[in-house]
Every structure is written in C-alpha cells, then in structure tokens.
Amino acid sequence: MIQDFLRYLETEKRAAALTVKSYASDLKSFEAYVHENFEHESLQHIKKSVIRSYTVHLSKSKLEPRSINRKLSAIRAFYRFLEQRHQLNDNPAATLKSLKTSKKVPDFIPQNLLETIQNEIPHDFTGLRDFVIFELLYQTGIRRAELCQLKDKSIDFSSALIKVHGKRNKERLIPFGFKLAALMKTYQEKRNAHFNSEHFESFIVSNKAGACYPQLVRRAVASSVVAISGKLKISPHTLRHTFATHLLNNGADLLAIKELLGHSSLEATQVYTHNTIDHLKKIHHQAHPLG
C-alpha cells in the first residue's frame, strides 16, 4: 500500500523526489511502530487511537512539533489516498490535527553585509562558479533543487528570464538584471574554456564537469560568505529568504513576491512581513513629525 501511494505521488501528483523520499521515510517509520506495538493491526485497519499513540511516542522522543507535524501530514495524505481508492471503511486520520507550533521568522542577511561579498568577482573557475551560485540564489530567489536542475537552455538572455520547474513540476519564469546576465555569461565562457566543451548536463557543473548537486550548492554558499563576520549559519535557503525580505523592504508587492518565489498560497509569503519591522520603524522615525 505504501509503495502504491509513493508511485501515485511520483506519477500523478508529480511530487519532487525529495518529497517522495521524505514521505517514504515517515510512513515506514509509522509502519514499523504499528508492527512493533500493535502486531495484530494492519495499516489498512488501524484505529484513530493508534495514530494518537504514535503522536505521543514522537513527542516523548523529543521531536520538535514541526517535525512531528510533517510526519502526521504524510500519514494524513496516505490515508486520504486509500480512502479515495475505496480501500478503507473508516479513515483513522480524518480528524487528525497538527500540533501547535510557534511561527519561525525566516533568517536573512542584512543588505549592508551583502555588499562585502559582492565587491570582487573571482577569476578562477571554482571561485567564479561559487560566486554565480550565490548571486543566482540571492538575485532570483531560486530554490536549491531548482538551481541544481537549471540548464543552459532554461536561461533566455534576450528576454532576461529564467524558466524553472518548482514543486509539483510547476513552471514559472524569474526575471534577472543586466549585472547577473553579464555574470552568468562570463561564467559560461569560463566553464566552456575550462573543460573545452559547450555541452553540459546542467548550467552549474561540478569540478569534474558533472551535474550540480545539493552539497555543491551548500559548499558554494559557505565559501562565499566567509567575508560576513558574526553570521554563524547561512544556508542556500537563507538567500531565498534574503531575496524576499529585501524585495519587500524596498517596496515590492507581496503578490508579486509570491509569484517570484513560486508559492502556492499567499500565507507562505506573508511570513516575510515579520522581517520588515526594523524597516517600518525607520520609516516611522523619518516620516512622522514626532518620530
């Protein structure tokens, strides 16, 4: 049943590979718990109390509510799938509620600190590639997985647009400025000359001309932020948060940011409004007569 559900996610829902992998891990952990503690129960015939017991078990394991909710989401989706295919008499996850979580405000890099990174462009291939990775993440808000899948043909320099395929294979277009265009062209020329070839599997390539992969992006970001002192943790996703926050701080419309990020709902984008309080204080101080 779990394998049928995973195939459904891949083929019909077109879920990302990482999403399918995550659901598989969460459901197999749940299945192992059921078999160990309720040996006469099958996943198809369990009661709501079994899922409640599993939730308590996860809480006692000191997992964060956010992590528990992710696992519950997988269980909820799995039983909804069985229900839709009439393989259940009663859905045990129908009334399953998520745990309360505190809203986490996305971390971002202040604009003045970014200027210390963007002053000098490296000339060697590896340094230039890492710099391009950093600038693409910051200037377009592209996801790490989307960047790894980016091809040369996905970049339209004449229209200054990048075509990406996001979650659930949803396609969107991201604009870019002339400075980033010049940087990407310089990188392409350096890459092609470095490997004496113009044919690559992806736009960003490894030191051995292989396809881009998540760890490569993470290391590239880490190597690019050594100039920022006092910043202990900057991930590729931090740059996506930074992209959205800087747009919002400089007057961009929230709906436009939603489209640029590829969010399916405005709720996911609204979290960035929490980061603008310092900006609002500055406006109030400058504009109000008694500020």
Image: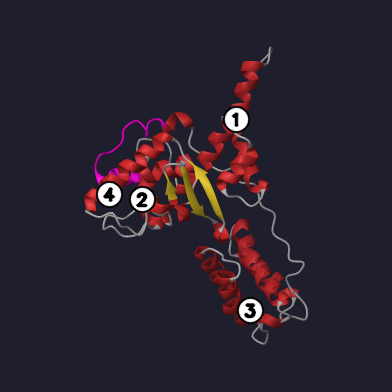
Residue named by callout 4: 191
Report x, y in % for residue 226: 35, 39
- For the residues labelled 3 and 4, the Cα–Cα distance comes to 52 Å
Q: Identify the element where label 3 is drawn.
A: helix
Q: Is residue 220 above or below residue 252?
A: below
Report x, y in % for residue 198: 28, 54
Q: Amino acid at mark 1?
A: Gly
Sort mark 4 into few (<14), some (14-19) or many (20+) by Cα contacts within 10 Å. many
Give the residues in magenta: 115-130
Which numbered disc flags the more N-terminal residue, 3 or 2? 3
Report x, y in % for residue 173: 53, 47
Residue named by callout 2: 219
Sort mark 2 into few (<14), some (14-19) or many (20+) by Cα contacts within 10 Å. few
Q: Nearer the viewer, mark 3 or mark 2?
A: 2
Q: Residue at x 32, y 57 (%)?
A: 200
Query: Would residue 13 be found to the left or right of residue 242 on screen?
Result: right
Query: Would residue 60 be found to the left or right of residue 95 on screen?
Result: left
User: Outermost residue toward the front?
Assistant: 158
- For the residues labelled 3 and 2, the Cα–Cα distance comes to 39 Å
Q: Amino acid at mark 2?
A: Arg
Q: Circles 3 and 4: CB distance less than 8 Å?
A: no
Q: Residue at x 40, y 51 (%)?
A: 218
Q: Identify the element where label 4 is drawn.
A: helix
Sort mark 3 into few (<14), some (14-19) or many (20+) by Cα contacts within 10 Å. many
Residue named by callout 3: 34
Q: Nearer the viewer, mark 3 or mark 4?
A: 4
Q: Residue at x 62, y 24 (%)?
A: 281
Residue named by callout 1: 251
Which numbered disc flags the more N-terminal residue, 4 or 1? 4
**Within the image, what quadrant is residue 1 found in?**
bottom right
